[in-house]
Amino acid sequence: MRNLFRILFRVLILATVFLVSALTAMRFAIHGREVAVPRVTGMTASDAERSAVGNGLLLETESRFYSADIPENHILSQLPPAGEKVRRGSQLRVALSLGPQKIVIPSVIGQSQRAAEMNIGRRGLEIGSVAVANLPGVPPEQVVAQSPPPNATGVASPRVNLLVSASQEDSAMLYLVPDFVGHTLDEASQAIAVSPMKFGKVTTVKNGKSANGNGQTRVVPPAKPPGKSPVIVRQNPAARQKIAAGTMINFEVMR
């Protein structure tokens, strides 16, 4: 009986040593798969791609913005920031510069949604979000507001958000929240002024990050040009959520 106890005791010690060794090896293995994020801000898209791949990361162009300071096809900003440790194979999300704004924002108010989308696409612009609202006295599926407004200059994003009257088949008194992330606070204010929504609270955050878990965050330019409206990095409720008329939209803008 005493010999059996000694054997079990030795087995327990060996099992403990094995478990500690395995955990230590796993810890070193996981740590060894971590890499430091390279600095790609200011690089061309191709150079940033090579730098990311060379460090075991995947480059994703998440946003595109106009910039009077950063040349076209160069990286405006990145997430995660340079120097941060991440797992190998993680995504390095970047915002790409489109250079100075050269395209005139067309007026699509009064057009059908389909005609507006074609008009915007022909100008080399993109459709942002399309909010649908029940508006008595307005023909169905007609654009009643847009952001940025017609002929706007100094806009941050090539996306144009639309507010469209509901179709005859849509009787629900709910509205889709537009995507304001990446647009300026002035653009959001103008769009909300002609919508069933209300302008809510504005919070300033640093480096495009926030501790608030609500809404959505996107890679944005590092700073607003002097005299320009701040850029929205987060909104709550998030884009494409259905809300009732009178709901407040809260914003976080970058310092």
Image: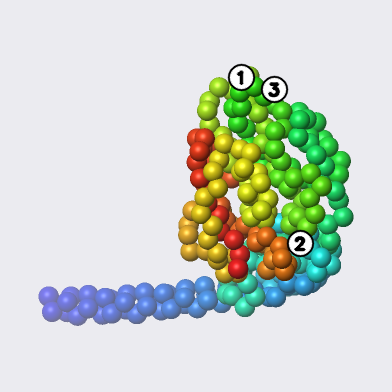
Single out the residue that lies furthest toward the top. 168
**Residue depth check, mark 2 versus mark 1: number of the one nearer the observer:** 1
Quadrant (top left, top right, bottom left, bottom right) of the N terminus: bottom left
Q: Which residue is mark 3?
A: 139
Helix, strand or loop at mark 2: strand
Q: Nearer the viewer, residue 235 or 93?
A: 235
Q: Residue at the location (66% across, 53% down)?
A: 186
In space, the residues marked 2 and 1 are separated at their CA atoms by: 40 Å
Residue 169 shows which numbered tag?
1
Q: Earlier in the sequence, mark 3 or mark 1?
A: 3
Helix, strand or loop at mark 1: loop
Residue 114 appears in the figure? no
Residue 199 appears in the figure? yes
Q: Residue at the location (62% across, 32% down)?
A: 132
Q: Residues within 10 Å of mark 3 (few under 14, many from 20)?
A: some
Quadrant (top left, top right, bottom left, bottom right) of the C terminus: bottom right
Q: Quadrant of residue 241?
A: top right
Q: Which residue is mark 2?
A: 96
Q: Residue at the location (48% across, 64% down)?
A: 211
Q: Nearer the viewer, residue 33 or 229?
A: 229
